[in-house]
Amino acid sequence: MNCNKTRQAIISGQMTKKVSGHLVSCTSCREMHEKVNKTMALLDEEVSVPETLAPSILSKIEKSAPRPVKKLNLLTYIQVAAAVCFGIFIGHQFGRYAGPVNRTAKTDAVTQYFKAHHLNLDHSDFRSPSFINPNRHD
């Protein structure tokens, strides 16, 4: 058994014969097992609490005054009002252009395409540049 599996078994509390055999041969795992046992023994000890502990804590809680509510000053109100006015102004400016759109285009999509592109032009005088340069020495 390897150290990782042994440590997982020690932490989970599943002590098997393989784990015990590994603890005999491995000093680091054995030290970890001893530390875990000491810690668990400390946690299992009962601690006595004085009778006056709970009432003293509760009396301190009752004596403490609640924190005062923070009041807003005039400057804060002015800043909030300015932000609201700015928002209304921006909304008004954008709203001016948000009206109904008057469409002047025809509903025929093919006609719109031909008008928007060069396909309806007269190409009788079109001359294409030649990619082949004639030899001027001929």
Image (cartoon, grey):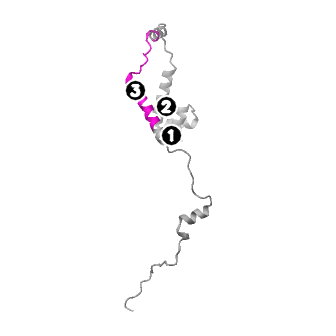
Counting residues from the N terminus, which is met first, the one under dot 1 or under dot 3?
Answer: 1
Q: Position of residue 36 (x, y in %)?
A: 49, 29
Residue interval drawn in magenta = 61-89
Q: Nearer the viewer, residue 122 or 22?
A: 122
Q: Amino acid at mark 1?
A: Asn
Q: Main secondary structure of the magenta part?
A: helix
Question: Which residue is tagged 3?
Answer: 78
Q: Amino acid at mark 2?
A: His
Query: On screen, 28 above or below 75?
Result: below
Image point 43% across, 35% down: which residue?
Answer: 86
Closest to the camera, between mark 3 and mark 2, is 3
Secondary structure beneath disc 1?
helix
**Residue 33 badge:** 2
Image point 57% across, 57% down: which residue?
Answer: 105
Question: Which residue is tagged 1?
Answer: 4
Secondary structure beneath disc 2?
helix
Q: Position of residue 74 (x, y in %)?
A: 38, 22
Q: How many marks?
A: 3
Q: Is residue 115 left or right of residue 130?
A: right
Neighbour class for label 2 at 10 Å: few (<14), some, many (≥20)?
some
Q: Which residue reaches farthest bottom?
A: 138
Query: On screen, 40 above or below 48?
Result: below
Closest to the camera, between mark 1 and mark 2, is 1
Q: CA distance from mark 1 to mark 2?
A: 13 Å
Image point 41% across, 25% down: which residue?
Answer: 77
Secondary structure beneath disc 3?
helix
